[in-house]
Amino acid sequence: MKFLSLIFISILVSLSSCIKDAETDLFVEGAVPIYAILDIEVIKSSPPQEMTNTSNFILYNSYILIIEKFKGIHVIDNTNPSSPLNISFIEIPGVTQLTASNGILYVNFGRDLVSVDISDLLNVQVLTSIFGFYSEESLLLYPENFSGYFECVDLSKGVVVEWNLMMLTNPNCRVF
């Protein structure tokens, strides 16, 4: 009888180790969003910056305008194509799309569509903004080219401009 009791107790102990304790936290490396508060006042010309995460570009007159994803636009003077010059950076948090015509640059600014006077690329001026022009799905709601856990985006904190890796506790969001 003692032998059967010992077997029964060992079975219970081994089964209990298979049941996840509801009090146990999950600690895992994952992506955390970095936010920017969108305010038209932050759109401005600044000195040239290093290109690190570029995407789309357009040719405008003798310039090449290159998006630095979610941060702004590099202005390259291509008057001499054999020696292009990085002359300026237009700070536009959240930018992923651009076009230009007749001295006006049109960009997304989070969910807004903004027009910017670029007649002087070293001193740009915001002209107009159409609030809520783009859908929420156009925003960066999950880390691109990433598989794993991440901190869910909270749009009340601003627009996501980049992601950092760090240790997370019980993350609710995951991409495969």
Image: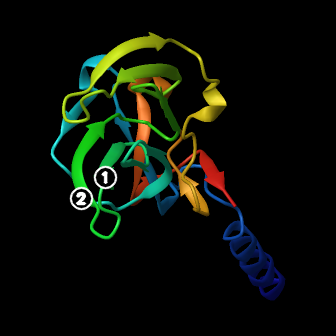
Tell me what residue is drawn at x 44 percent, y 31 percent. 159
Find the residue positioned furthest to the bottom.
3
Q: Is residue 68 above or below residue 98?
A: below
* Residue position for label 2: 85
Who's the residue at 44% across and 13% down the image? 129
- Closer to the camera, 117 or 91? 117
Distance (Cα) linking label 2 and label 1: 5 Å
Mark 2 surroundings: few (<14), some (14-19) or many (≥20) residues within 10 A: some
- 141 lies above or below 9: above
Quadrant of the image for the C terminus?
A: bottom right
Q: Are marks 2 and 1 in contact (CB under 8 Å)?
A: yes
Q: Looking at the picture, which amino acid does disc 1 mark?
A: Ile
Any part of residue 151 in sight: yes
Asked whether 109 or 4 is in front, the reply is: 109
User: What x and y, as percent, mark residue 4?
Assistant: 84, 83
Q: Quadrant of the N terminus?
A: bottom right
The residue furthest left is 47
**According to the image, what is the colour scheme of the structure?**
rainbow
Image coordinates for residue 93, horizontal then vertical, percent: 36, 35
Total tally of numbered discs in the picture: 2
Residue matched to label 1: 76
**Left or right: 153 as drawn, with respect to 136:** left
Question: What residue do we see at 50% from left, 45% from top?
Answer: 151
